[in-house]
Amino acid sequence: MIKAGVSLKIKIRSYRHPEDYKAVFRVWKLARKGIHVSFSDEEEEIKKLVEKNPGLFFLAEIDGKVIGTAMGGFDGRRGIIYHLAVLPEFQNLRIGSKLLSCVEEGLKKAGCSKVYLFVVSENSELSDYYARHGYEKMDVIPLTKKLN
Ligand SMILES: CC(C)(COP(=O)(O)OP(=O)(O)OC[C@H]1O[C@@H](n2cnc3c(N)ncnc32)[C@H](O)[C@@H]1OP(=O)(O)O)[C@@H](O)C(=O)NCCC(=O)NCCS
């Protein structure tokens, strides 16, 4: 936990592939229950995401150390936000909110007018966090299918 009054130089910048991959993967692993790391987070899959969605993956760093991430994607109709995560010792410093705004701005610039994100049920208390950022619950049943 960071002591009150300590000023930190937090930099938000775009993700660079592949040089940032290991550091962002570490953040996802350490972010605890809210982030489920899956095959979609392997290096090749992230490469596909960033090639198709330039300018939508942001990270936060302090002294060159990656401490937060947020990824966006846009399919031409809806945007989606993945892996908003801040290392536990740097949480509650508005870093997550800044990363979220950066992805939203990037999506707007890409022509996106509506965005989705998924909160895993074990992390349902986070709905209030997103509600404060303007997100509404949807009356849908999420379904998924692996294609290979
Ligand atoms: C969710 C997360 C990204 C928020 O980032 P952050 O930088 O810590 O949050 P911010 O500083 O922007 O916002 C802080 C506010 O959010 C609230 N908040 C933070 N995490 C919360 C949580 N898990 N549940 C409910 N509220 C939470 C804080 O209480 C604080 O409220 P306040 O404004 O009344 O003081 C961060 O807590 C995190 O990485 N969590 C683990 C991974 C995760 O669950 N990601 C979301 C995937 S959908």
Image (cartoon, helix red, strand yellow):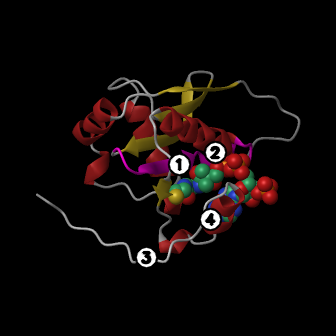
Kind of residue at badge 3: Val
User: In the image, residue 10 lies at what x, y percent?
Assistant: 68, 28
Kind of residue at badge 2: Gly
Kind of residue at badge 1: Leu
**Labels 1 and 3: the sequence-earlier one:** 1
Residue identified by numbered label 4: 126
Does the beta carbon at disc 1 come under 8 Å from ligand 1? yes
Q: Is residue 92 left or right of residue 147?
A: right
Tag 1 secondary structure = strand
Residue at 34%, 26% in the rendered image: 17
* Label 1, label 4: how far apart the Cα atoms are: 11 Å
Residue identified by numbered label 2: 96
**Labels 1 and 2: the sequence-earlier one:** 1
Q: Quadrant of the C terminus?
A: bottom left
**Labels 1 and 4: the sequence-earlier one:** 1
Q: Nearer the viewer, mark 2 or mark 3?
A: 3
Q: Nearer the viewer, residue 42 or 75?
A: 75
Q: Which mark is residue 84?
A: 1
Residue identified by numbered label 3: 140
**Labels 4 and 2: the sequence-earlier one:** 2
User: In the image, residue 131 lies at what x, y percent?
Assistant: 67, 63
Q: Is residue 53 left or right of residue 119?
A: left
Q: Is residue 68 visible?
A: no
Does the beta carbon at disc 4 come under 8 Å from ligand 1? yes
Q: Which mark is residue 16?
A: none
What span is colored magenta in the figure?
Answer: 76-94
Q: Using the image, determine if residue 26 lies above or below residue 10.
A: below
Tag 1 and tag 4, C-beta contact below 8 Å: no
Kind of residue at badge 4: Leu
Q: Is residue 142 left or right of residue 63?
A: left
